[in-house]
Image (cartoon, rainbow, N blue to C red):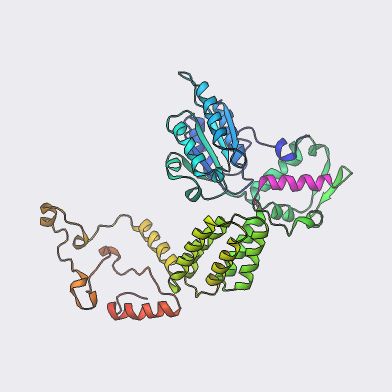
């Protein structure tokens, strides 16, 4: 018999649970599907949120041939064979087949390159699924030819709908007398993953010989107790442990940071994934308090990209301890957040004339570049002038962090600007 998750796989958009932001009644992807105007897309989201299911639903709805490859066990030869099959099905008015590639982020550059021609020529419509940021893992030429849609972990309301469907519509479970007294453990262990929720439910159900029983938090926890401490790099523990790892570094605890690093290494986590998170953390959480942190993190990423286990663990450990023991500041992170919000609130404010480029005589006559003061022509390479649009000239986006380096920066800026900005 098929697993519960497979028996309950949705066959159409109305049965599909979650992702209302992209396939709800008025959402853009649903409109494209209903109008039969689907283009190549990449579905980015955590495991178990319905990426594969959505790809199959799209194929069924549009009545197109569906070719599926997994990047884990497919190579360039498999891609080319799928493309050749698609070519043979090309007729004058025949819509192109859908080529679904699961875990497309695992494809090498050469494998992704082999897709380009077929996508460009319309031989296939590509649907890629990935759990990693496609900006990092998908080559730019391919990414530019596909629209990226972000899928989210299922929310409590979605999980409740899925649980109810399983108990009332599944051919096996609907014939059992199952009472669900508590759902917290079921939902917690699922981690917003539909497939995991159904797998947990099936495991619990199969643990009972009788057809009548009650599901409680204790029942679920006791049955799954052996799996609680495992590291599943494709499941909820992946996200929980990387969260603990990042928070330990942010909290300046090198012991905890190295421990969570070890948990990921022992669990077989991708070293580039770990190193990439360190690059982000170095800019977001350490920032200007120690600019060398970003250099260290980037060098770590470059090093582990060419050196495999076991040596890369030493490089990661060095970088992690350096970042954990560095002073912390999120001032750069907060500054860009505030500046972006200001842009959203005020729109495209006029650029002051003295800051504009004046490559032609006409522009100079219009005042472009007039009254601009060249900073290097003044004492200490500084002269007081306005660089922001007039409407927001009093705004202050960058506020120094409380660390030695930025305190020195604060004093320097006060000497230059006086009380113009609140540092």
Q: Is residue 115 above or below residue 195?
A: above
- Magenta-highlighted stretch: main secondary structure? helix
Q: Is residue 189 magenta?
A: no
Q: Is residue 110 left or right of residue 423?
A: right
Q: Is residue 163 left or right of residue 317?
A: right
Q: Residue furthest right?
A: 210
Percent of width and height locating residue 299: 48, 63
Q: What are the residue bounds of the magenta stretch?
A: 191-206
Q: Is residue 174 left or right of residue 106?
A: right
Say which residue appears at 87% left-offset and 44% top-offset: 212
Say which residue appears at 62% left-offset and 47% top-offset: 47
Percent of width and height locating residue 143: 45, 43
Say which residue appears at 64% left-offset and 50% top-offset: 234
Question: Which quadrant, please, contains the C terminus?
Answer: bottom left
Q: Is residue 361 left or right of residue 344?
A: left
Between residue 399 and residue 259, name the one nearer to us.
Answer: 259
Between residue 147 and residue 134, name the one nearer to us.
Answer: 134
Between residue 321 and residue 392, name the one nearer to us.
Answer: 321
Q: Residue furthest top?
A: 92
Percent of width and height locating residue 364: 12, 57
Q: Is residue 68 visible?
A: yes
Percent of width and height locating residue 414: 32, 80
Q: Is residue 205 magenta?
A: yes
Q: Is residue 330 visible?
A: no
Question: Which quadrant, please, contains the N terminus?
Answer: top right
């Amino acid at each position: 018999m098929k697993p519960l998750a497979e028996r309950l796989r949705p066959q159409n958009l109305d049965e599909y649970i979650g992702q209302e932001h992209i396939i709800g009644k008025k959402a853009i992807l649903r409109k494209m599907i209903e109008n039969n105007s689907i283009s190549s897309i990449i579905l980015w989201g955590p495991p178990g949120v319905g990426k594969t299911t959505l790809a199959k639903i799209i194929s069924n709805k549009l009545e197109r041939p569906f070719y599926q490859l997994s990047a884990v066990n497919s190579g360039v030869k498999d891609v080319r064979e799928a493309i050749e099959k698609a070519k043979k099905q090309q007729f004058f008015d025949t819509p192109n087949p859908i080529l679904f590639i699961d875990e497309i982020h695992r494809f090498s550059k050469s494998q992704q390159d082999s897709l380009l021609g077929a996508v460009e020529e319309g031989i296939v419509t590509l649907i890629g699924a990935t759990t990693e940021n496609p900006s990092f893992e998908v080559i730019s030429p391919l990414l530019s030819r596909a629209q990226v849609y972000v899928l989210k972990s299922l929310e409590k309301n979605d999980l409740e709908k899925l649980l109810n469907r399983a108990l009332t519509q599944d051919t096996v479970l609907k014939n059992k007398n199952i009472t669900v007294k508590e759902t917290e453990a079921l939902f917690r262990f699922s981690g917003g993953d539909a497939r995991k929720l159904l797998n947990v439910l099936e495991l619990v159900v199969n643990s009972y010989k009788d057809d009548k029983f009650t599901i409680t938090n204790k029942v679920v926890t006791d049955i799954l107790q052996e799996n609680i401490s495992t590291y599943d790099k494709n499941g909820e523990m992946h996200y929980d442990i990387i969260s603990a790892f990042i928070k330990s570094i942010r909290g300046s605890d090198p012991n905890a940071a190295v421990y969570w690093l070890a948990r990921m290494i022992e669990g077989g986590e991708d070293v580039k994934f770990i190193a990439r998170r360190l690059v982000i953390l170095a800019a977001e959480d350490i920032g200007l308090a120690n600019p060398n942190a970003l250099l260290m993190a980037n060098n770590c990423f470059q090093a582990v990209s060419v050196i495999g286990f076991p040596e890369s663990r030493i490089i990661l450990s060095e970088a992690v301890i350096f970042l954990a023991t560095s002073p912390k500041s999120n001032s750069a992170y907060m500054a860009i957040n505030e500046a972006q919000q200001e842009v959203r609130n005020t729109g495209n404010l006029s650029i002051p004339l003295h800051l504009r480029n004046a490559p032609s005589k006409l522009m100079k006559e219009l005042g472009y570049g007039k009254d601009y003061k060249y900073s290097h022509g003044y004492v200490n390479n500084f002269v007081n002038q306005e660089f922001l649009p007039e409407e927001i000239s009093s705004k202050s986006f960058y506020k120094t962090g409380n660390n030695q380096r930025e305190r020195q920066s604060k004093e320097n800026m006060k000497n230059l600007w006086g009380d113009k900005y609140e540092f």
